[in-house]
Image (cartoon, rainbow, N blue to C red):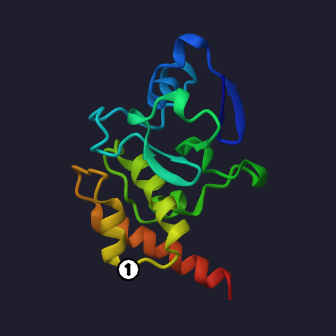
């Protein structure tokens, strides 16, 4: 079986095909940006994009998603243009969002998915989209500021 992850094809050995995507990413492929948090899909630390939709990798069986395009936090940067960060990643740094950093990959992936569907979200839409991503450090205000930074820079770039 093969998986399409971050624009690359990976072979998945038969003994890993019954595992969760999170386990395969972290233990088999060494892609450790997605974190193990609760293990039951409630905290959001393991969020990845599957065909552009934010999903919890701890709840996905590898065998169920073999034909889909998977993007992890490691795959967001644009390696074609000198390893430039994705605009959401850059906004996170510009707004000094990370503290402990444990939830950040999941928060970023959920934000990327939100902005694909709602290019100019309100604070309420941001709060709703990220409600399933738990952050103990309390950086929600800076997260909203980072999302608005991305929206504003995209609006400025299109002028």
Location of residue 106 in the rendering, given as x and y in whole percent from the top left corner: 41, 48
Dot 1: within a 10 Å radius of its alpha carbon, few (fewer than 14), some, or many (20 or more) residues? Answer: few
Location of residue 135 in the rendering, given as x and y in whole percent from the top left corner: 26, 51
The one nearer the camera, 6 or 151, is 6
The one nearer the camera, 114 or 105, is 114
Residue at (68%, 83%) from the top-left corner? 158
- Quarter of image, res 5: top right
Q: Is 38 on the left or on the right of 92, as rendered?
A: left
Residue hosting label 1 = 122
The quarter of the rendered structure image containing the C terminus is bottom right
The one nearer the camera, 112 or 81, is 112
- Quarter of image, res 29: top right
112 vs 77: above or below: below
Residue at (59%, 12%) from the top-left corner? 14
Q: Residue furthest bottom?
A: 159
In the rendered image, is residue 139 in sight?
Answer: yes
- Quarter of image, res 58: top left
30 vs 42: above or below: above
In the rendered image, is residue 25 in sight?
Answer: no
Q: Residue furthest right?
A: 80
The one nearer the camera, 110 or 144, is 110
118 vs 1: above or below: below
Location of residue 48 in the rendering, given as x and y in whole percent from the top left corner: 49, 45
Q: Is 153 on the left or on the right of 4, as rendered?
A: left
Residue at (30%, 35%) from the top-left corner? 37
Residue at (66%, 22%) from the top-left corner? 1
Q: Is 5 on the left or on the right of 49, as rendered?
A: right
Circle 1 sits in a helix, a strand or a loop, which is it?
loop
Q: Give the number of callouts.
A: 1
Q: Residue furthest front?
A: 64
């Amino acid at each position: 079986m093969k998986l399409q992850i971050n624009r690359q094809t990976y072979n998945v050995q038969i003994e890993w095909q019954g595992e969760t995507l999170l386990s395969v990413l972290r233990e088999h492929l060494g892609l450790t940006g997605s974190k193990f948090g609760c293990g039951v899909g409630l905290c959001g630390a393991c969020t990845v994009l599957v065909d552009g939709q934010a999903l919890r990798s701890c709840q996905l069986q590898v065998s169920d998603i073999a034909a889909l395009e998977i993007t992890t936090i490691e795959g967001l940067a644009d390696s074609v243009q000198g390893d430039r960060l994705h605009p959401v990643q850059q906004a996170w740094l510009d707004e000094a969002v990370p503290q402990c950093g444990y939830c950040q990959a999941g928060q970023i992936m959920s934000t990327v998915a939100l902005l694909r569907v709602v290019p100019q979200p309100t604070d309420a839409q941001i709060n709703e989209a990220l409600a399933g991503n738990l952050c103990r450090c309390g950086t929600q205000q800076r997260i909203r500021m980072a999302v608005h930074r991305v929206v504003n820079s995209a609006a400025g770039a299109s002028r």
